[in-house]
Image (spheres, coloured by chain):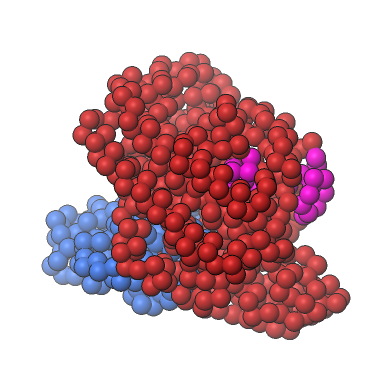
Chain colours: A blue, B red
């Protein structure tokens, strides 16, 4: 089974880049030929291009949710993320992109798409390369969750 | 006073907001668009190596990395006092054509177009690419995906990476083209030209042949008589990569034409306390509030702004389409906001034709792709991003480190116009406190025509985006709430 692990976020927008930080850590742990780890500052259609051809996709990203505690790490499945008309003014949502790919007969869509969300109350709007203390503390938690998501057969060097 | 708040603009709740204020009669008095402004970029850039700016700025926004990359690269040419080689300029422009191809296709078929192709009255759940596929057919859907991918492939070949190019350097580019790559690009470009023609035909069949849609395009709520701005070549034809910034007035006459080096003499920014977003305006006219007309310094950029600010397209097929658009919708300038969609397709045809010219040019495989840089100083760079004029301005110290950086981005240039378009769309649908059911659709169509990019909205997970209208009574208490999930 081929799996892609994607850290999503903007590496120069402080806490927004947390997914990238998690992906960087994972790269040090995982040396499994069936697991691809990558970073992406993108969404929707471009994200679709990146995950097509894999059996499973694990996306790591900052998520803003009502009543969530900043720094909590939660696991979602793609079906938890409802689609909406034009979620983003200049891209479609991943859910919409996936539906479109299905409609067009794409046969290489990952069978399972999991989202590891690092919760935030406020989305960061300040440029910077460092994570805040609370969000930085969530990185090892997210790493552990991704590792267990990848399963026991994974070749890990800790 | 009643206040209506629409909260649809980004998937990040609370970040983008439309607030509509009603007067005592219950009619629309004003509307405000509040979007987040990413802060601290100037401070973030200070002390960094200037050569890193094309990579750093391409990460400001997940939507138009190529535009930032090239604006930064051009600002560095200027800052290091170096003129890129002729081949380098062509390679950069070809890269840029790839970007406009995929970006304009994405907007027309996935974002703004569905409002028209599927229909403005269609349920929102259908006004997306899936709706377009239902209406236009599965084969069309496949062509859309194919040509969007071609645009990205062209960008990747020239830029070194798919979404975030790394090829731009002061004085040139880091990567030339091999004969094999030229052949590959030629084949893709040929197909893209046909697809652009097809898209214009689709626009004709579905939209222009439908009187209801044409009436909507020409209807009052979507008319805005602002100045128009865009880059033009020496013959005043639209140019994405370079030239002078031209501004035309409400009669379509040239009002200003200037080199980017003088942008701060002609453009100033107004600050409103309710918005993080700044409102640029023409300095010589001045800021006179959110209104259109000759006495207001507000201008529009983007596809329609560019076509209005020019005297044609530099390639034959696109120029023919340019003339047809102005003949069909009346004299220049066209003030119908919804004509942005048509203008976007004409530009799509132009960049495909232009890409053919560039890739057919024997110089495109030249290995003279970089000139040596001079001493560091101050630099200005401008390109036409998909959604409008984008300016980068840097001051370097003697070691080539950034001392000061200022960016004027496309969506900011359109801030005043977008705000007014939202207000006018709302005006037509809210009378005496009665809110028409079509409000959400019409307001959405108004801002989507501009293809606005709000940097914060580009990266988070696919989440549900509430589209919400809150109506408050004159005491600002909640009176009505319309929600779309």
Q: Is residue A64 left or right of residue B194?
A: right
| Left or right position of A101 against B68 | left
Looking at the picture, tell me which residue is in the foreground, B21 or B446.
Answer: B446
The residue that appears at 41% across and 16% down in the rendered structure is B372
Q: Residue furthest right?
A: B24
Drawn side of residue B63 relative to residue B120, left or right: left
Identify which residue is drawn at 51% across, 78% down.
B123
Q: Is residue B41 above or below residue A62?
A: above
- Give how far across and how far down residue B341 sits, in percent: 54, 56
The image quarter in which residue A4 lies: bottom left
Q: Is residue B122 above or below residue B185?
A: below
Residue that sits furthest to the bottom in the current view: B479
**Residue drawn at point x = 82 percent, y = 45 percent:** B295
Q: Is residue A41 above or below residue B122?
A: above
Q: Is residue B56 above or below residue B466?
A: above
Where, quadrant-wise, is the N terminus of chain A in this rendering? bottom left
Q: In which quadrant will I find the C terminus of chain A?
A: bottom left
């Amino acid at each position: 089974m081929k799996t892609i692990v994607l850290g999503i976020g903007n590496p120069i927008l402080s806490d927004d880049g947390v997914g990238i930080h998690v992906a960087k850590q994972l790269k040090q742990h995982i040396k499994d030929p069936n697991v691809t780890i990558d970073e992406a500052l993108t969404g929707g259609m471009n994200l679709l291009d990146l995950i097509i051809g894999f059996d499973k996709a694990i996306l790591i990203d900052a998520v803003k949710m009502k009543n969530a505690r900043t720094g909590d790490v939660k696991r979602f499945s793609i079906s938890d993320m409802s689609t909406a008309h034009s979620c983003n003014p200049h891209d479609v949502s991943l859910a919409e992109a996936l539906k479109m790919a299905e409609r067009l007969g794409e046969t290489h869509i990952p069978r399972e798409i999991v989202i590891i969300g690092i919760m935030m109350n406020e989305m960061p709007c300040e440029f910077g390369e460092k994570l805040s203390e609370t969000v930085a503390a969530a990185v090892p938690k997210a790493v552990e969750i991704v590792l267990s998501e990848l399963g026991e057969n994974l070749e890990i060097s800790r | 006073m009643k206040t209506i708040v629409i909260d649809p603009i980004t998937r990040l709740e609370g970040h983008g907001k439309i607030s509509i204020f009603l007067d005592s009669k219950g009619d629309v008095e004003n509307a405000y668009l509040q979007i987040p402004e990413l802060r601290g970029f100037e401070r973030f850039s200070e002390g960094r190596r200037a050569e890193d700016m094309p990579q750093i700025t391409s990460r400001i926004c997940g939507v138009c990395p190529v535009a930032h990359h090239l604006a930064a690269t051009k600002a560095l040419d200027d800052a290091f006092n170096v003129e890129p080689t002729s081949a380098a300029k062509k390679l950069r422009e070809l890269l840029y054509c790839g970007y406009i191809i995929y970006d304009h296709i994405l907007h027309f078929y996935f974002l703004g177009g569905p409002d028209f192709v599927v229909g403005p009255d269609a349920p929102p759940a259908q006004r997306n690419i899936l709706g377009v596929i239902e209406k236009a057919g599965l084969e069309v859907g496949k062509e859309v995906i194919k040509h969007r991918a071609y645009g990205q492939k062209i960008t990747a070949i020239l830029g070194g990476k798919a979404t975030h190019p790394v090829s731009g350097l002061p004085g040139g580019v880091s990567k030339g083209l091999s004969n094999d790559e030229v052949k590959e690009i030629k084949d893709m470009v040929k197909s893209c030209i046909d697809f652009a023609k097809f898209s214009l035909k689709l626009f004709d069949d579905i939209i222009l042949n439908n009187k209801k849609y044409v009436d909507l395009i020409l209807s009052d709520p979507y008319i805005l008589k602002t100045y128009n701005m865009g880059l033009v070549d020496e013959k005043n034809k639209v140019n994405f990569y370079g030239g002078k910034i031209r501004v035309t007035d409400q009669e379509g006459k040239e009002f200003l034409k200037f080199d980017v080096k003088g942008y701060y003499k002609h453009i100033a920014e107004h600050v409103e306390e309710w918005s993080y977003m700044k409102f640029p305006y023409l300095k010589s006219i001045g800021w006179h509030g959110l209104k259109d007309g000759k006495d207001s310094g507000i201008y529009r950029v983007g596809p329609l702004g560019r076509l209005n600010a020019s005297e044609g397209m530099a390639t034959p097929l696109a120029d023919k389409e340019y003339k047809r658009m102005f003949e069909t919708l009346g004299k220049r300038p066209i003030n119908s906001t919804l004509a942005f969609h048509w203008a976007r397709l004409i530009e799509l045809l132009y960049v495909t034709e232009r890409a053919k010219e560039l890739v057919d040019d024997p110089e495109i495989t030249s290995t003279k792709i970089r000139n040596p840089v001079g001493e560091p100083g101050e630099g200005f760079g401008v390109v036409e991003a998909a959604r409008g004029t984008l300016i980068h301005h840097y001051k370097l110290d003697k070691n080539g480190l950034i001392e000061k950086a200022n960016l004027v981005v496309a969506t900011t240039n359109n801030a005043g116009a977008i705000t007014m378009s939202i207000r006018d769309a709302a005006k037509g649908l809210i009378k005496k406190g009665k809110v028409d059911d079509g409000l959400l659709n019409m307001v959405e169509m108004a801002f989507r025509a501009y293809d606005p990019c709000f940097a914060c909205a580009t990266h988070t997970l696919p989440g549900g985006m509430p589209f919400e209208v809150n109506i408050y009574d004159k005491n600002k208490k909640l009176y009505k709430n319309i929600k779309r999930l």
